[in-house]
Amino acid sequence: MAKELKFEEMMKKLEEIVSELESGDMPLEESLKKYEEGMKFIQACRKKLDETKRKVEVLVKKDGKSTLEPFKE
């Protein structure tokens, strides 16, 4: 992951890795490398989601005034 990938690109790579691992056609060492690569993508996706979640604020009108409130799940 030398360059910064978009979230969607990371998810696509992760899906490809899962498919490869599920096929069962790889030697153990290669499977382990793919697993480690997949874990890195999972961590990067989580980080991206956490960053985005913190940035998301909902604009709410109260008493004719606009206020920003944190995003609620």
Image (cartoon, rainbow, N blue to C red):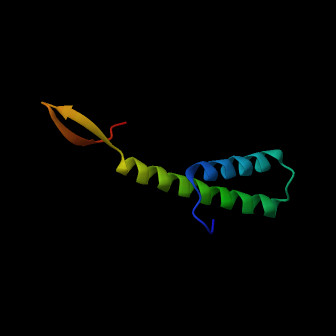
Residue at 83% over, 46% down:
23
Residue at 73% over, 63% down:
33
Residue furthest left as drawn: 63
Q: Where is 8 relative to 41, above or below?
A: above
Residue at 80% over, 64% down:
29
Residue 30 found in image quarter: bottom right
Where residue 22 appears, as percent x and y from the top left, is: 78, 45
Q: Nearer the viewer, residue 65 or 31?
A: 65
Where residue 47 appears, as percent x and y from the top left, is: 48, 56
Q: Where is 10 relative to 67, above or below?
A: below
The mark tally for this picture is 0
Q: Give left or right: position of 64 versus 11.
A: left
Q: Give left or right: position of 4 versus 13.
A: left
Residue furthest front as drawn: 64
Q: Nearer the viewer, residue 58 or 72?
A: 58
Question: If the image is split into quadrants, where does the N terminus sit?
Answer: bottom right
Residue 43 found in image quarter: bottom right
Residue 32 found in image quarter: bottom right
Where residue 50 appears, as percent x and y from the top left, is: 43, 51
Q: Give left or right: position of 35 versus 25.
A: left
Question: If the image is split into quadrants, where does the C terminus sit?
Answer: top left
Residue furthest top as drawn: 63
Residue at 73% over, 49% down:
16
Residue furthest bottom as drawn: 2
